[in-house]
Amino acid sequence: MFFDPVYWLVIGIGLLLGFWAQARVKGTFAKYSRMPVRSGVTGAQVAEAILRARGIRDVRIVPVAGELTDHYDPRRKVLRLSQPVYGARSMAAAGVAAHEVGHAIQHAEGYWPLRFRSAWVPVANIGSGLSYVVIILALLLGGTATALGQSLAVAGVALFATTTVFTLVTLPVEFDASKRALATLEQSGLIARDELDGARRVLNAAALTYVAAFVTSLLTLLYWAWRLGLLGGGRRD
């Protein structure tokens, strides 16, 4: 497989998509991190105000090291905001903080894609860890050219598909959180309407990383299905 140009084409596309998406989100975040909101609220204050307005009082807001490491932990009900968001008073900080609160609201309301994604995490972890081992064994046995190779090929692709399913279900979870964030910011008056554009651009750029992850995973899944002979009579040599 390491000498297969199709393999390197798929890997190359995935890397380019990932680099492009990361560059967009980092550049957009940096730009709007330099634009303060006139209300002077920090990211943590935005998060606290939205949670309080929605009647959610059992979620803690804590700072976390790093940049763009913001996330909501549904198991511990902890909203972790990175250093450039927690105490920052920028359009970018307001957008990111509101987005993460969107996940807390999803959790409180039992939003089913979030529940599915949380339950799917251990499945995807197991699939990711075992898939390449099984796929390599299937390749060594000739893929669909042998009965055992075909069984391993199906198992390997199925295991890898668990990660593709995870990246797929992540899309509605993240898009919905951003939609909730922008609507809440507009309704709350925490930032002015003309400042919403900065928050929107940051969240749209962040969404590209999830789209890139799904496309990369899907292309890789299709490659392995083809390479093992399960799709379109792929090469078995």
Image: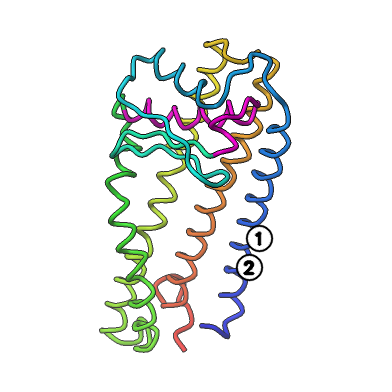
Horizontal side of residue 34 vs 138, given as left or right: right
Taking 193 as reference, is 1 above or below it?
Answer: below
Taking 45 as reference, is 229 above or below it?
Answer: below
Residue behind mark 1: 16
SS of the residue under disc 1: helix
**How would you classify the magenta stretch by its main secondary structure?**
helix
For the point 68% across and 15% down, the residue is 38
How packed mark 2 is, by other alpha carbons closer than 10 Å (few <14, some 14-19, many 20 or more), is few
Are the residues at dot 2 and dot 1 in contact (C-beta closer than 8 Å)?
Answer: yes
Q: In the rendering, which numbered label is found on residue 12?
A: 2
Taking 1 as reference, is 92 above or below it?
Answer: above
Residue 217 at what x, y percent from top left? 48, 59
Residue 66 at what x, y percent from top left? 55, 47
Between 193 and 40, the residue placed more toward the observer is 40
For the point 68% across and 33% down, the residue is 33
Residue 179: in magenta span: no
Residue 1 at what x, y percent from top left? 51, 83
Taking 200 as reference, is 21 above or below it?
Answer: below
> Magenta region: which residues?
83-107
Residue 141: image quadrant is bottom left
For the point 28% across and 39% down, the residue is 75
Identity of the amino acid at label 1?
Leu
